[in-house]
Image (cartoon, rainbow, N blue to C red):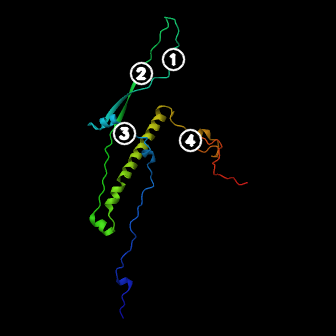
Amino acid sequence: MAVTQIADVVVPAEFTSYVVQNTMERTALFQSGVAVRNGEIEALLSAGADMLTVPHWNDLGNEEANIVNDNPADESTPYKINAGKQIVRKSFLHNSWSAMNLASELSGDNALPRIQERVTAYWDRQMQRRLVASLNGILADNIANDGGDMVRSIAADMVGAITANTRFNATGRDRGHRHPRRCDAT
């Protein structure tokens, strides 16, 4: 006797509807406002060329000030100010996404609205990565050329293992203050 069994039929697969799976990467630094638009720079960037030079005046030095007296032979020795320049390399960024109608039909969900809702977040992540890379470059330049005066290492403060007194915080040291929610067993 012939019997139709599971092996003889096509069993359709049952799926749940699509859920959203966003990246865990956050862009709080970029969105904090640490990077702001500058009209002058934007005007320069809209001009031709792939690089531009931004000249700037450096700050006055820290030479000791002259002491004033009433001796006409004592004359002030003037100091000078100097300038520098920053070389800006333009970044030409581009990306695109697409979806075929058949892919959306067979998947049971339309990919294009998902693409549209995530484009801004994608570009925010790209800008934050560029911002962090630029900040790392500034720190590396500072360490290489200026003795690392912009870098604070708490490693020099630590002797031995990390303890409650050497944990990192905003000032670089915990100074033994306990977390208010911490309870020590006796």
Is 97 situated above or below 57?
below
Question: CA–CA distance between discs 4 and 3?
Answer: 28 Å
Secondary structure of the residue carrying tag 2 is loop
Q: Which mark is residue 170?
A: 4
Left or right of 68? Residue 30 is left
Residue 51: x and y, percent? 31, 36
Is 83 situated above or below 158?
above
Residue 186: x and y, percent? 73, 54
Question: CA–CA distance between discs 3 and 2?
Answer: 28 Å
Q: Nearer the viewer, mark 1 or mark 3?
A: 3
Secondary structure of the residue carrying tag 4 is loop
Going by the numbered disc 1, the residue's amino acid type is Ala
Say whether disc 4 or disc 2 marks the residue closer to the N-terminus: 2
Q: Nearer the viewer, mark 2 or mark 1?
A: 1
Question: CA–CA distance between discs 4 and 2?
Answer: 35 Å
Residue 141: x and y, percent? 45, 35
Q: Which residue is mark 3?
A: 37
Secondary structure of the residue carrying tag 1 is loop
Q: Mark 4 and mark 1 in contact? Answer it, CB < 8 Å.
A: no
Quarter residue 92 falls in: top left
Q: Which residue is mark 1?
A: 65
Q: Which mark is residue 81?
A: 2
